[in-house]
Image (tube, rainbow, N blue to C red):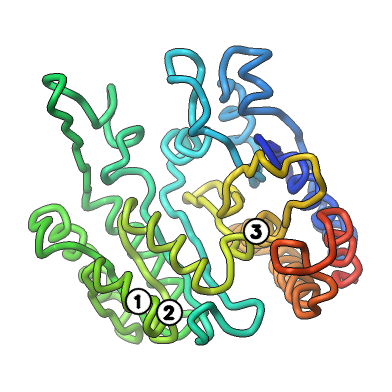
Amino acid sequence: MDILVLPGDGIGPEISQATLRVLERANERFGLGLQCRHDEMGFATLKKEGTTFPARILETARRCAGVILGPVSHLDYPPSDRGGVNPSGEFRVKLDLYANIRPAKSRLGVGLTGKPVDLVIFRECTEGFYADRNMYMGIGEFMPTEDIALSIRRVTAKCCNRIARRAFEAAQGRRKKVTAVHKQNVLRISDALFLREVRKVAQEFPDVQLEEVIVDAMAALLVRDPTRFDVIVTGNMFGDILSDEASEISGSLGLGGSVNAGDDLCVAQAQHGSAPDIAGQDKANPTSLILSTAMMLEWMGRRHGSDALTRAAAAIEAAIDAALSNPQTRTADLKGPLGTLAFTQVVIERLG
């Protein structure tokens, strides 16, 4: 099976290389038979090819079993008509990677609130208020006059149903609880449709509890008592915001894995940004991308019925936890003494 590797911008090349070293060790230990294919995107291709996302990347990705996507500096890209394309959005829309799955877990003991966190957010990420992915032609934002800006929110029964189904399937293997986050008291039509589809799916999973929480209350409850939550399902914008909050509460954005998954492909992507201010200084913490890659392997294991891939994913996560358990084998952002390369070596050693 082929894995496409796209290092990205800023610290992307460093943490991608660290992740590949861990993946290579897992590949050897578990006999996974993985082959990596390498390409470029972001500022590297903007300079050479006039675009941050060459068309060939999608075609290559379609022929691969998984993708490792490094962080990108898309906020610094030029407008799309000058080649500035957001790779994350392109992957999600063009390859229908509708499920952004982001666990939040206290890997350093307890979270910032003093309570342990162990939850996972299922965010629908192909529609909603995000203007770059909710229209067939053009974008979902426009200005009829220079003083009026309008934004369109697209919500479909199909997309709500399938993200709800993935959330309930995940809950069956966890603590059997799904929290649907919405703003139906204000968005009375679009979020009513979302809740209708979630409730419809819930009927097929009678052993899983469903609760419904308004998004502003949810933001507070995550801080007050994150232990009450197991699997959270929500739309694009709410999920984007709440997943960052949950990761910070659990310890750090840098300790959370993340994948963008469809029915046929899974893309591993770190939760954090490209951090250009520390690029090339051996300061970056590669944990998030390594854990994201482990999540990708787990997804591939389920899809292809491979016990070896599933075991490799679990072993990588265990190696990360073992490295983080000792303050002397943590990176500087966690008040440890190690740089990117040294931390990666510790993880490889813990992997066995």
Closer to the eye: label 3 or 1: 3
Q: Is residue 209 left or right of residue 71?
A: left
Q: Are marks 3 and 1 in contact (CB under 8 Å)?
A: no
The three-letter code of the residue at mark 1 reads: Val
Q: Are marks 1 and 2 in contact (CB under 8 Å)?
A: yes
First reached walking from the N terminus: tag 1 or tag 2: 1
The three-letter code of the residue at mark 3 reads: Ser
Instruction: Give the number of the disc on residue 178.
Output: 1
Q: Nearer the viewer, residue 126 or 42?
A: 42
Q: What residue do we see at 34% from left, 57% from top?
A: 162
- Residue 225 against residue 131 in the figure, above or below: below
Which residue carries the number 3 mark? 288
Q: How many angstroms separate mark 3 from mark 1 (CA)?
A: 24 Å
Which residue carries the number 2 mark? 230
The three-letter code of the residue at mark 2 reads: Asp
First reached walking from the N terminus: tag 3 or tag 1: 1
First reached walking from the N terminus: tag 3 or tag 2: 2
Q: Secondary structure at mark 1?
A: strand
Numbered-mark total: 3
Q: Residues within 10 Å of mark 1 (few under 14, many from 20)?
A: many
Q: Is residue 293 left or right of residue 201?
A: right
Say which quarter of the image contains residue 176: bottom left
Q: Secondary structure at mark 2?
A: loop
The x, y position of residue 193, in whole percent, is: 15, 57
Q: Secondary structure at mark 3?
A: helix
Q: What residue do we see at 58% from left, 12% from top?
A: 50
The x, y position of residue 29, in whole percent, is: 89, 64
Instruction: Give the number of the disc on residue 340.
Output: none
